[in-house]
Image (cartoon, rainbow, N blue to C red):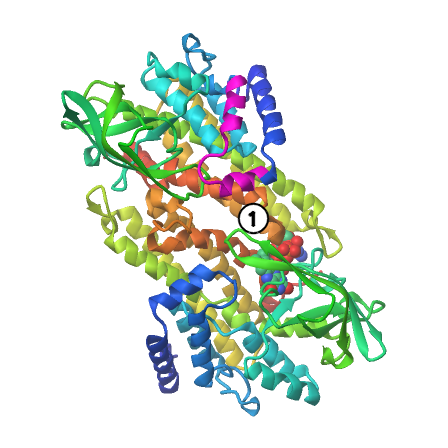
Amino acid sequence: MRPAPTPEQEELKQAIREFCAREVTQERLLAWESADGDATDGLRRAIAELGWLGLGLPASAGGSDASLVDVAVALQECARGLLPRSLVGAIRGAVALAAVAPESADVRGLAAGERALALALDEESGGTPGAFVTRIETRDGKPCVTGVKHYVPDAGAALHLVAAREGSGASLVLVEADGACVVRDALRSFGGDQQAHVRYEAAPVRARLTPAGEGAEALARLRRQQSALALAEMIGGMEAVLEMTVAYVKEREQFGQKIALFQAVRHQIAEMGMRFTAARHLAWQAITRVSGGCEQGHELASALAYVGQAFKQLCWTGHHLHGGAGFVVEHRLRFHSERAQSLCVRYAPEAPALAEIANALLGK
Amino acid sequence: MDYELSARERAWRDEVLEFIAEHVDEELAAESRSRGNEGRGPRAQRFLQALKDRGWWGLAWPEEFGGLGKTAIEQWIFIDEIETAGAPMLPLTVTSVAPTIMRIGSEVQKREWLPRITAGEIDFALGYSEPEAGTDLASLRTRAVLDGDEWVINGQKMWNTMAHTATHNWLAVRTEPEAPKHKGISMMIVPMDAPGVSVQGIWVWPGLRTNALFLDNVRVPRDHLIGERGMGFYYAAMALNFERLSIGSIGMARRHFRAFVATVRERVVDGRPLREDPWVRERLARLQVEIDAARMLGFETAWTLDQGRMPAAESSMAKIYVSELSQRIADTGCEILGLNGQLHAEDPGALASGRMQWLYRIAPMLAFGGGTNEVQRDIIGFMGYGLPRK
Ligand SMILES: Cc1cc2nc3c(=O)[nH]c(=O)nc-3n(C[C@H](O)[C@H](O)[C@H](O)COP(=O)(O)OP(=O)(O)OC[C@H]3O[C@@H](n4cnc5c(N)ncnc54)[C@H](O)[C@@H]3O)c2cc1C
């Protein structure tokens, strides 16, 4: 038992913390938000040089061979420092491809930051493969993708990993997204990622990542991996919100005293701390087990159900204790609150997590 | 025991609903949503004019000031229905400042200001808060010094919403620096075009604009101090009291919830109507129960007022409940919408016009603004149940 980061992981965290403190300034956060398209290219190259895009990728592809836990440790820190989600997405995309198809020739390019990969997994009608509208067809003897994927994060990426229906099953394929047969309808989302609904008009398949029609299991594994990484992001956000709120109540005065001296304020800080502590361990238990391939039951569902709600609750209390000061658009707090909602809805919705736990308890 | 509206109250509600049916349409609601508080749009202007023509500006005013002298229950019905319909609420100038002037202003001041308010010539921004004086309003520092027949005002206000569109500021200033802090404040009316007044925009999370207000040797005539010197803290509290029914109203949340429920009813996910999902049904039903409960707390406030008692604890209950429930509605709503729930409210594709996402952003302010919930909870303890203060 060692419910804490290793010295190497601490070192990585520290490096990311310093990077974020330097690069993710208030002005930039606002500028990125109002920019048309992704304005974080420079930073992507910088983190590629630091080797962070190759975290969790095989050494043979220029990666560092780190485990999913190490990647999660990094993402926790990225989230804490509000590193743009497009960069977090680049790390996630690389890890996703490496997990599904470690041999893929494209992994190397992702590690080097030459290209980024978007995960086009969801559709408006829901996420279950049987209901996918997007499908793989054959044109001139070659497979291509037709249909619409919705809410694709970082949709501007040059490569798309698409989940599509094929025959009676599902397949995971890689699509080159630069051409005219991939059309993006940009969205404005809470999480600050560059989302779009993406229409694939007979877009040629660049590579198959699973055998035709046999990708459902790989898709489910991919989702679990991505949810585990989201847990780390949420813990990073919670940590930041708790820290800034503690600092603020120790500094803000009303009625001639620090507001931290009001019992009602102290109780709220205590509540935040309690939830954060429980969330942190639930999250890391789940991440380490998903990473080690040794899940014992419903630990991922439990973590998702708890952490998503706890993050939103921390943000709410954080806002409350900051009063007007935390409500201005420039304040970092609201970026965390937006990410909380975004991460929770995409990766940690309560209903399916509870359903999984209920199934474990009661049978289907 | 009787929970039905009286014949008179029913007739009044019908009249209000008829007015709403005639004057409120989806375009007006959409305009209100899209403008935030960048001044009123043409449709809102027209709506308020119609309210005025109908004689409803003076809904809550005593009859001697040309008002209708409606009971608190009748006011509550009005607020509830207008908010539920998504129509613009009467300006605070009319519902909060004017009734205060009626009670505390000198005869000359009433003659000077009330007709202009009635005519719609005056629109106030409310200048209470300062950077260091939020919940602890009595510690405000903006000061005014008498120089001959004029007050000279210096200082800074914070969160002075509508200052960029208002004609005047209803300003709390320190005039008696030697007095204990609650007794050293006065209320003044400051024209926004007075030399030395400047406004700087501040944008907040839900996309609304508020302002910092700077006062640099601003001169106003001596008689712009309303009521008595040193009583400003109590006047500000009185003005806030007149807002009690609105602040604790569940109307806005109820409207968003209704529109949201309509969306859920139509939505199909994975080939299955969302309304059939047991989790969704349970969540929505629970929220409906909470909305019903919140409405009862608002009703209790109105009823207490009509009994001639000050509903301090009652209105605090309504305020806390509504603000915290708004968060729960938004949270659940975004989740029920699935991935659509993480779109920004301003994305045209956000279902139910992005109401849940917007409510998620506005809800925190409902809790710390309008008298923060901690203080409201203290009030319930002290005033409602006689708990000792020390
Ligand atoms: C968008 C917006 C519009 C606004 N519009 C106006 C306006 O038009 N006019 C105007 O005058 N003001 C306006 N306000 C200001 C608003 O009224 C204040 O934000 C509010 O009074 C809280 O003050 P504060 O923000 O300074 O928070 P603080 O008072 O600093 O409170 C911070 C935290 O401390 C807690 N706290 C404070 N005192 C106690 C206590 N005694 N016991 C326990 N906890 C305590 C609070 O609950 C809160 O959680 C607006 C604010 C916003 C954000």
Determine if residue B379 is in view. no
Mark 1 CB near ligand 1 (8 Å cut) = no
Was residue A54 drawn as part of the magenta stretch in this picture? no
Viewer-nearest residue: B135 or A218: A218
What amino acid is found at the position of numbered circle 1 in the picture?
Answer: Val
Where residue A192 sits: x, y (%)? Answer: 46, 39
Q: Is residue A283 above or below residue B45?
A: above
Image region (quadrant) for ligand 1: bottom right
Viewer-nearest residue: A274 or A181: A181
- Magenta stretch bounds: A28-50
Quadrant of the image for the C terminus of chain A?
top left
Q: Is residue A357 left or right of residue B73?
A: left
Viewer-nearest residue: B379 or A163: A163
Where residue B210 sits: x, y (%)? Answer: 59, 59
* Quadrant position of residue A357: top left
Q: Residue at x 55, y 20 (%)?
A: A5
Determine if residue B100 is in view. yes
What secondary structure is found at the residue carrying circle 1?
loop
Q: Mostly what secondary structure, the magenta segment?
A: helix
Where residue A178 sits: x, y (%)? Answer: 33, 28
Where residue B352 sits: x, y (%)? Answer: 34, 55
Q: Chain of mark 1?
A: A
Q: Is residue B142 above or below residue A42?
A: below
Q: Is residue B153 above or below residue A92?
A: below
* Residue designated by label 1: A329
Q: Is residue B173 left or right of residue B58?
A: right
Q: Is residue B3 left or right of residue B115?
A: left
- Crowding at dot 1, Cα within 10 Å, few <14 / some 14-19 / many 20+, comes out as some
Viewer-nearest residue: B86 or B75: B86
